[in-house]
Amino acid sequence: MRVIVGITGGIAAYKAPMLVRLLKKAGHEVQCVATEHALQFVTPLTLETVSGNRLYSDLFAPANDHTTEHISLKDWGDIMIVAPATANIIGKLTSGIGDDALSTLLLAFSRKPLYVCPAMNTQMWECPSVQRNVEFLRSMGVHIIGPAEGDLACGTQGAGRMVEPETIMECLSSDLSSPAKTELLKGQRILVTAGPTYERIDSVRFIGNYSSGKMGFALATALAEQGAEVELVTGPTALKIDHPHIHRTDVESAREMYTAATELFPQCCAAILSAAVADYRPESTADHKLKKNGNEGMTLTLVQNPDILATLGKMKTQEQKLIGFALETDNELANAKSKLERKNLDFIVLNSLRDKGAGFGVDTNRVTIISKDGKELTTPLLSKQEVAEQIVRHCLVGVGK
Ligand code: CTP
């Protein structure tokens, strides 16, 4: 692959040569484009040495092949990544400003994967205008990686660190191997559960939860893009999905989801259960609307629903893989690990509710994927689609083969 690495003027620019080295080591061709400010932190000689190519920085340099360098480079590159990306370059890309080699190239680089790794001081990152710009880029399909949290160069702590080059490589991996992308799970049947369940109280009321179904639908899409035949069993959601390899079954209650999932699982080589299943349902359901009848209070007796994940864990054969989700508020890792063991899973995906931008309803997520041999992988805050791609690549590549 031909990768363009854009570098802007933040202290994290010192990590850019490491990213370039990792890309080269993985067999990719790299061209670096740096802003003038970036070259205060990293030298042209370093970037040219690690990339093995001339650095582009000055839009009007006499050494340029011709005056429309940004046009020819955008045709050359298969994928582009800006690391680190300052608030300035994010603002320029959002507003359509091109006033140097990198910003003009970014405006011209369209319809190909573009990754942006923000790095800045926490207050700058949290500034509403920066957040608005980042959201706009996301809505344009730009992949935003990070920033990570931790010690910052300005002596403070918080969100704003550039994500480490190794993690950036993980995030890029699906696009860096895109020629094989549709082949990785070709023909493999995989079950996904998604959305909430509704447990009826009477003919007009139910017990539900805030799950939107976005994570499960993103997983179904990521699997189908890898060629899998997806059985998507979903609780009530407004989401639509239209893919020739996704077969959708709509259910309402946990018991309906249990029936559909246990019927389908034996025909599948793997299952990812991301649904937010109600643990309890009302003991009885009225077939009419319950009236107040002057009562001050009301007591609902709840009974436990079947645990779909634990049931599939018992049904699972040696060849099948089972992946569950955990949403924890206390002792997150310990609780997730014990759930993984208890339910006989291969992987558990721990959702963090502590992160702004992660959890119910939003388009982004940050997860930790824990395997049964105890290995952990924590993603940066990514779009749910990117998180889904990471889960699929990390947990399922090679399944059924
Ligand atoms: N799950 C399921 N069937 C249920 C409840 C949960 O399949 N009746 C699945 C979810 O889809 C998710 C995982 O189990 O993949 C975790 O659910 P969670 O409610 O967090 O775990 P519980 O086992 O119910 O544990 P607890 O409520 O004690 O946290």
Image (tube, grey):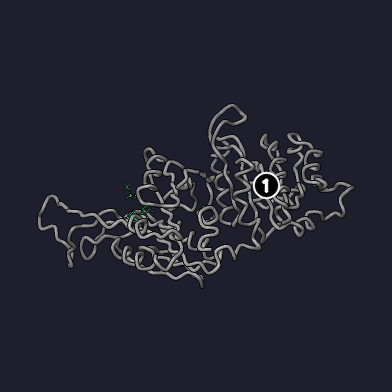
Looking at the image, residue 381 sits to the left or right of residue 345; the answer is right
Q: Nearer the viewer, residue 334 or 315?
A: 315
Q: Determine whether the beta carbon of the residue marked 1 sits less than 8 angstroms from the nearest atom of ligand 1.
A: no
Where in the figure is residue 401, as x and y percent of width and height? 53, 63
Query: Does 289 appear above or below 375?
Result: below
x and y, in percent, of residue 382 in the image: 54, 49
Left of 49 or right of it: where is 176? left
The residue that mark 1 highlights is: 82
Amino acid at the residue labelled 1: Val
In the picture, residue 398 is in which quadrant? bottom right
Tell which of 49 and 157 is nearer to you: 49
**Residue 223 point in image, percent of width and height:** 51, 62
Answer whether residue 43 is visible to the viewer in this image. yes
> Secondary structure under badge 1?
strand
Q: Residue 265: horizontal and vertical position, in percent?
A: 39, 65
Is residue 357 in sight in this rendering?
Answer: no
Pick out the residue farthest to the bottom.
244
Q: Residue shown at 55%/33% (left/top)? A: 150
Q: Residue furthest right?
A: 62
The extreme top residue here reads 155
The quadrant of the rendering that contains the N terminus is bottom right
Give the image quarter of residue 310.
bottom left
Rendered position, 55 above or below 251? above
Report which quarter residue 111 is drawn in. Answer: bottom right
Tell me: residue 119, above or below residue 360: above
